[in-house]
Amino acid sequence: MTGTLAIAAKRLDPAKFRDPAVTAKGERRAVVGLAALSTLWINTGTLCNIACSNCYIESSPKNDALSYITAEEVRAYLDEAVAIGAPLEEVGFTGGEPFLNRDLPAMLRDVLGRGLSALVLTNAMKPMMNQATALLALREEFGDALTLRVSVDHHDATLHDLERGEGTFARTIEGLVWLARNGFRVHVAGRAGFDGDEAAMRAGYAALFAAHGIMIDAGDPVALMLFPEMDAEVDVPEITEACWGILRKSPDSLMCASARMVVKRRGADRPAVVACTLLPYDPAFELGATLVEASRPVALNHPHCAKFCVLGGAACSR
Ligand code: SF4
């Protein structure tokens, strides 16, 4: 963690998050059922053109723990979604940097051609620009059904570069401006952990967008998503069944109630389906090889469940 984001925090109690059925205090752990599969995430592979200091999935130019998935493999899941009558509305693509996967344009065409929405999380740098012609053709054909969510960690170039590497801010803004000028539906993902003042962060992004003529409403929590920091070592409360009533939160509001993610592990014969985008590596959250197998409920047995989803309030979809 960088000095900018570091805060003195109590370390996680090792007795927590051990038993999927009960918490350290012996209370029944909260479980989330799949209410309706409306969003399917595809991890395109963990390779990335840059290495960020706080990347939750540890993407880098060297990390291929999750391999490039192929258009054919994705197609099989889209077909399965139809076969089982899943009310799929949107397919999201995350990496790594999705545009490094050469099959991305074909995968997007498959998704959009079925009348679904597509969302791509990107740093908008060179790998995306290398696919500019294919992207323009997709925008021409499918318009606003395609959204690109560009990661801009901070509206200040120095702080962004501290996370992502020197010179990355300038190249990302160049890509963002290109997307905006060419009429793409564009959102931005930032990080909320820099100073904790959300209003000030949003005002800073608003000024950045205005300076570059980018038509994104920085006050819109979907158009500008500010994600809380994810540190699985920091102590967090466990989520019990009683929490739903105490917090007045519905389990159906969590990502794992409406989404799953497909990953392809290095060396694996075929892809696997995990509970959500936040836990691609934890075997306890790998639910099966097919969407049917992966439709079983998920026990909230990870610090991310508590911090990021139930208490942090962030979602990874639209
Ligand atoms: S991290 Fe969030 S979305 Fe993932 S399984 Fe836990 S509660 Fe569900």
Image (tube, rainbow, N blue to C red):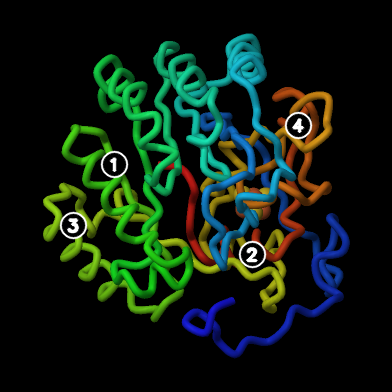
Q: CA distance from mark 3 to mark 4?
A: 38 Å
Verify CB contact (< 8 Å) between mark 4 and mark 1: no
Q: Tell me where residue 151 appears, x and y as whole percent.
A: 40, 53
Q: Secondary structure at mark 3?
A: helix
**Label 3 belongs to which residue?**
209
Residue type highlighted by circle 1: Val
Q: Nearer the viewer, residue 315 or 188?
A: 188
Q: CA distance from mark 3 to mark 1?
A: 12 Å
- At label 3, counting other C-alpha atoms closer than 10 Å, the crowd grade (few under 14, some 14-19, many 20 or more) is some
- At label 1, counting other C-alpha atoms closer than 10 Å, the crowd grade (few under 14, some 14-19, many 20 or more) is many
**Label 1 belongs to which residue?**
186
Instruction: Describe residue 212's horizontal placement relative to residue 79 as left or right.
Output: left
Q: Nearer the viewer, residue 156 or 307?
A: 156
Marks 4 and 2, the one that precedes in the sequence: 4
Query: Which of the numbered marks, if any, corresponds to residue 272?
Result: 4
- At label 4, counting other C-alpha atoms closer than 10 Å, the crowd grade (few under 14, some 14-19, many 20 or more) is many
Marks 4 and 1, the one that precedes in the sequence: 1
**Label 2 belongs to which residue?**
306
Q: Tell me where residue 13 appears, x and y as whole percent.
A: 79, 80
Marks 2 and 1, the one that precedes in the sequence: 1
Q: Secondary structure at mark 4?
A: strand
Q: Tell me where residue 67 appears, x and y as whole percent.
A: 70, 35
Verify CB contact (< 8 Å) between mark 4 and mark 2: no
Residue type highlighted by circle 2: Ala
Q: Which quadrant holds residue 238?
A: bottom right
